[in-house]
Amino acid sequence: MRGNTVSLVASLAGYGVKLPTLAVAEAAPVIFVARDGSPMLLDADKGVMLDAITPARSGTHIQILASGLGRVTPEWPTGVAAPLEHAPRVAGNVRVYLDRTPVEVTRAELAPGYVGFYLVEITIPKISNYGPAELYLDVDGASSNRVRVYIEP
């Protein structure tokens, strides 16, 4: 979809209902969270979900499951699962912040085998402040929700 706005019309029992015009953004990033509010973060090496009991460790790679990161290259059709190999990469500039400090993004692409999911992988730097930390991502100036990640040495 391209343009600044989109108009929607819904049909209910044969009657058309015009909905308010919606603004369209290049990116509107969101980090997925579970029902309990914990973020969808995975240890990239072990494939386990990260939480307070299973924290991230300095020097490891974690994967962030997200949506709304915008266009990819090469272009990929909406509603089609991403390929398992050579997934299209996010076209925009993806940055990730841990306690407002930028961290290395090792990849940002469509999540292989999924529809509408993106996978962003980062390296947790060696840090001195262990415990809970705020994590969020930014795509070309559009920021995501803030989530909590637990980090241990």
Image (cartoon, rainbow, N blue to C red):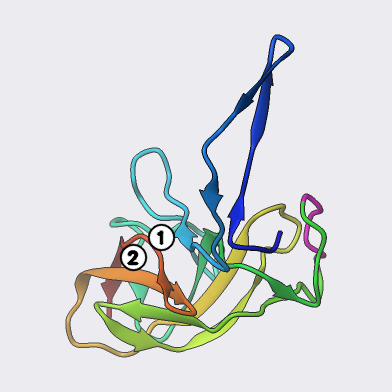
The quarter of the picture where the C terminus appears is bottom left
User: Eyeballing the image, is 91 above or below 56?
Assistant: below
Quarter of image, res 132: bottom left
Q: Is residue 22 magenta?
A: no
Say what amino acid the circle numbered 2 marks: Pro
Q: CB of mark 1 within 8 Å of CB of mark 2?
A: yes
Q: Secondary structure at mark 2?
A: loop
- Residue 142, percent from left and from top: 43, 71
Residue name at image x 36 percent, y 76 percent:
57
Report the residue marked by disc 1: 50
Residue name at image x 73 percent, y 63 percent:
112
User: Eyeballing the image, is 148 above or below 58?
Assistant: above
User: Eyeballing the image, is 110 above or below 61?
Assistant: above
- Residue 44, percent from left and from top: 55, 71
Left or right for 16, reference 48: right
Q: Is residue 82 magenta?
A: yes
Q: Is residue 41 visible?
A: no
Q: Secondary structure at mark 1?
A: loop
- Residue 47, percent from left and from top: 56, 63
